[in-house]
């Protein structure tokens, strides 16, 4: 989730020892007293990807039942994996001079009830933002009041943050160009450039005009994905769009212009490849 | 900080990929439906050690001033380092079948005011305990209402937890046998076996009887240690003892008996090497 414009460049903020050298290299003078580039409020949320989904699905953490040894062990294993990924992402951002702060939903005290993410105290997130940091949140194993535990997905977290923090826009990064009318590996798959979300939550494809408009858009969910894959992403994106917040779904390459706020106008440039999900006013 | 008795053994809970093999090895059947060994409420708190103290002291995170680029970068670098250490400790515990859950004070929303740790919401910690997990907390860079940021040391966290959660006893693990009457590397240094803490917070050595009782006990603080070294440990231990909670300071080897609750009696066995800090009633 992004609200802001240009990303800063400068001095690295990961001062950990590198594998290849025994010394921590840091020149305090590099920092001088110059101002760090001003960064608008900006939050990063990532999922578990290959870190965590295996651990969660093998043990059924998303289905609850912490009294079962396998579920409890899976909960611990999932948290270890997602924390590892979070740390790597924070380090990568810090190396690029982003003041990234890893924040774990479990530690933030966020929990669910019957797998629904009803309420979470966002004060730690907003305090981190107010102090000029970039909170880096992630999908996590959390406690559930009804079933003991579950998985809180990154997509659900983004929607919750969007609802309560009202960012200018939200960007979803994907490994395909955006949302397709069928699995993108299938021949003839068409990239959906603009999706309009209606008041009742239903959505329709505005651009391109699909030849066979009666044909259903097929959305598949990978078997190992405990949090719903592209289907969850679109429905979460639709719910965010309903709040009047534009959602861009794009690859890292094409996301840059979205992140910079260059796509805020009514018409999306033809050379931008991705999916815009927007409230149909 | 420990409250409880025996540690369980069984199935590993770190299912991350190992460097030496490409597959995650997990046999779901290993878990069966047998009960995990019952674990009493048990919290682990660690400091930053070589992870974090360098980053914090080089940048002056403990002195505050987040508007300075060096301090902000140091804050980010410190959090990366301590998170890395926390993850390694959680993984080590999980491999020994302890349901360890890393919890970061920053993410828990704990902050200080004028470097004093006044209040922290412990509900996330107690919920983790109630769900049968072992929270693993650590010294961390946190926000400070007065000076922007500071370092919250593991020792201070332990005292706060002791005050509010009232454990049966607390064990401090050290790399020397316990507290000595002078730096333990000096010839003739004497291990203090029992320290009595008085109502006014002052403390005196009960055992052994020091020949020259007028001689001051010298406590040194390493220059790189931003959180006070052994001096902080003893004064924090004294404050915990004043609550009526026994504090054992020992190496990992000698801590086992303390952790198991075998030293709860009035007289400490002669073959146990360590320092007991106890309220003088």
Image (cartoon, coloured by chain):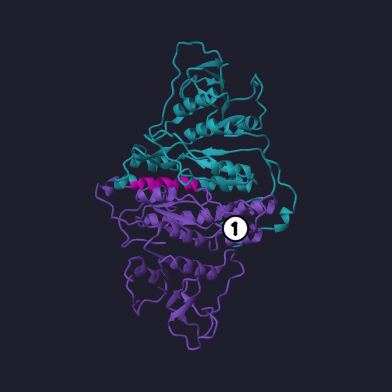
Chain colours: A cyan, B purple
Residue A245: x and y in percent read 58, 26
* Displayed quadrant of residue A259: top right
Work out whether A108 lies above or below B39.
Answer: above
The residue nearer to you, when weighing B242 against B107, is B242
Q: Is residue A139 magenta?
A: no
| Vertical order, B188 against B262 (above or below) | below
For the C terminus of chain B, which image quadrant? bottom left
Residue behind mark 1: B115
Q: Magenta span covers which residues?
A: A72-85
Res. B23 in view: no
Per the picture, the main secondary structure of the magenta-coloured stretch is helix
Q: Is residue A15 left or right of residue B196?
A: right
Q: Quadrant of the N terminus of chain B?
A: bottom left
The location of residue B205, given as percent across then percent down, is 46, 79
Image check: A36 left or right of B205? right
Front residue (pair A204, B162): B162
Give the chain letter at badge 1.
B
Q: Residues within 10 Å of mark 1 (few under 14, many from 20)?
A: many
Q: Position of residue B65 (x, y in %)?
A: 67, 53
Q: Report helix, strand or loop for mark 1.
A: loop
A91 or B49: nearer the eye? Answer: B49
Q: Is residue A27 left or right of residue A136?
A: right
Residue A76 highlighted magenta (yes or no): yes
On the image, the x and y values in percent for residue A9 come to: 69, 44
What residue occupies the far bottom of the structure in this picture?
B211
The answer to whether residue A179 is visible is yes
B198 over A214 or under it: above or below: below
Count of numbered badges drawn on the protein: 1
């Amino acid at each position: 989730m992004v609200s802001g414009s240009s990303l800063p460049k400068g001095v690295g903020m990961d001062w950990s020892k590198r594998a290849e050298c025994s010394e921590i290299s840091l020149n305090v003078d590099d920092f001088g007293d110059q101002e760090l580039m001003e960064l608008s409020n900006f939050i990063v949320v990532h999922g578990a990807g290959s870190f965590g989904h295996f651990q969660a699905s093998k043990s059924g953490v998303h289905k609850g039942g912490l009294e079962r040894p396998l579920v409890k062990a899976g909960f611990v294993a999932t948290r270890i994996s997602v924390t590892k990924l979070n740390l790597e992402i924070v380090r990568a951002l810090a190396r690029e001079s982003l003041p990234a702060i890893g924040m774990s939903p479990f530690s933030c005290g966020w929990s669910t009830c019957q797998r629904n993410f009803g309420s979470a105290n966002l004060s730690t997130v907003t305090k981190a933002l107010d102090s000029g940091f970039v909170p880096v949140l992630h999908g996590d194993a959390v406690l559930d009041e009804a079933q003991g535990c579950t998985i809180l997905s990154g997509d659900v977290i983004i929607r919750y943050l969007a609802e309560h923090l009202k960012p200018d826009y939200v960007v979803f990064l994907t490994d395909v160009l955006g949302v397709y009318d069928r699995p993108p590996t299938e021949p003839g798959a068409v990239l959906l450039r603009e999706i309009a979300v209606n008041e009742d939550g239903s959505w329709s494809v505005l651009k391109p005009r699909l030849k066979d408009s009666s044909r259903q858009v097929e959305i598949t969910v990978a078997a190992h994905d405990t949090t719903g894959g592209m289907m969850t992403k679109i429905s979460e994106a639709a719910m965010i769009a309903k709040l009047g917040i534009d959602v861009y779904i794009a690859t890292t390459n094409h996301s840059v212009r979205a992140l910079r706020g260059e796509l805020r106008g009514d018409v999306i440039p033809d050379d931008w490849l991705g999916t815009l999900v927007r409230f149909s006013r």
